[in-house]
Image: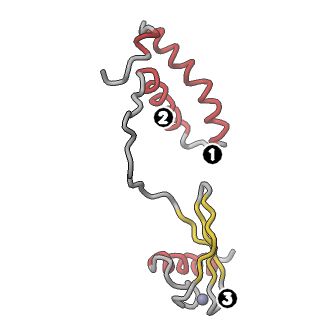
């Protein structure tokens, strides 16, 4: 890809995003057609412009949520649940810079984290009963 192509693509994308995807980035037509979406990890939708024949794919990223119903009985995480969660987060933060397969790391952490938590509780002398108590009480 030449520098000019990269610049052109960047300008096309910026213009399209600034228009909130309402106009063809190539011919500026407002009559663009959205086809069936694919809502996997990345939500995508094929778009075509009947005026100039351009085709592209809109890529949607999850940006926010609006809670429409809260469960009546909120699950209350135990001391142990929170410890596992905190250690997992801390490990992820440490390895953030490694370009690696996150799926493999996640599976490794699933096995590793409970052992680390066992060790931490053992060193601190916290009983099984205390570990299962609700967090924050
Ligand atoms: Zn067009």
Q: How many marks?
A: 3
Badge 2: few (under 14), some or many (20 or more) residues near its Cα, within 10 Å? few
First along the sequence among labels 2 and 1: 2
First along the sequence among labels 3 and 2: 3
Disc 2 secondary structure class: helix
**Mark 3 residue's CB less than 8 Å from ligand 1:** yes
Residue 102 percent across, percent down from the top left: 62, 41
Q: CA distance from mark 1 to mark 3?
A: 38 Å
Instruction: Using the image, tell me which numbered label, if any, was put on residue 16.
Output: none
Residue at image point 66% right, 43% down: 101
Disc 3 secondary structure class: loop
Residue 26 percent across, percent down from the top left: 58, 87
Would residue 45 be found to the left or right of residue 30 on screen?
right
Q: Quadrant of residue 71?
A: top left
Residues 100 and 82: in front is 82
Instruction: Using the image, tell me which numbered label, if any, was put on residue 53.
Output: 3
Q: Quadrant of residue 6?
A: bottom right
Classify 9 as above or below 131: below
Residue 5 percent across, percent down from the top left: 64, 79
Badge 1: few (under 14), some or many (20 or more) residues near its Cα, within 10 Å? few
Residue at image point 60% right, 54% down: 41
Instruction: Using the image, tell me which numbered label, if any, was put on residue 89.
Output: 2
Residue 80 percent across, percent down from the top left: 45, 21
Closest to the camera, between mark 1 and mark 3, is 3
Residue at the spot of label 1: 99
Disc 1 secondary structure class: loop
Residue at image point 65% right, 85% down: 54
Q: Quadrant of the N terminus?
A: bottom right
* Dots 3, 2 in contact, CB < 8 A: no
């Amino acid at each position: 890809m030449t520098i000019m192509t990269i610049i052109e693509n960047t300008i096309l994308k910026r213009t399209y995003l600034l228009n909130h995807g309402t106009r063809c980035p190539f011919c500026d037509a407002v009559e663009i057609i959205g086809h069936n979406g694919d809502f996997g990890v990345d939500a995508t939708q094929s778009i075509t412009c009947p005026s100039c024949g351009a085709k592209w794919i809109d890529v949607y990223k999850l940006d926010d949520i609006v809670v429409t119903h809260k469960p009546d009985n909120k699950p209350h995480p135990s001391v142990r649940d929170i410890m596992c969660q905190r250690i997992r987060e801390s490990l992820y933060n440490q390895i953030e810079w490694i370009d690696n397969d996150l799926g493999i790391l996640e599976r490794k952490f699933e096995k590793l984290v409970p052992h680390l938590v066992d060790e931490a509780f053992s060193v601190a002398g916290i009983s099984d009963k205390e570990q299962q108590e609700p967090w924050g009480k």
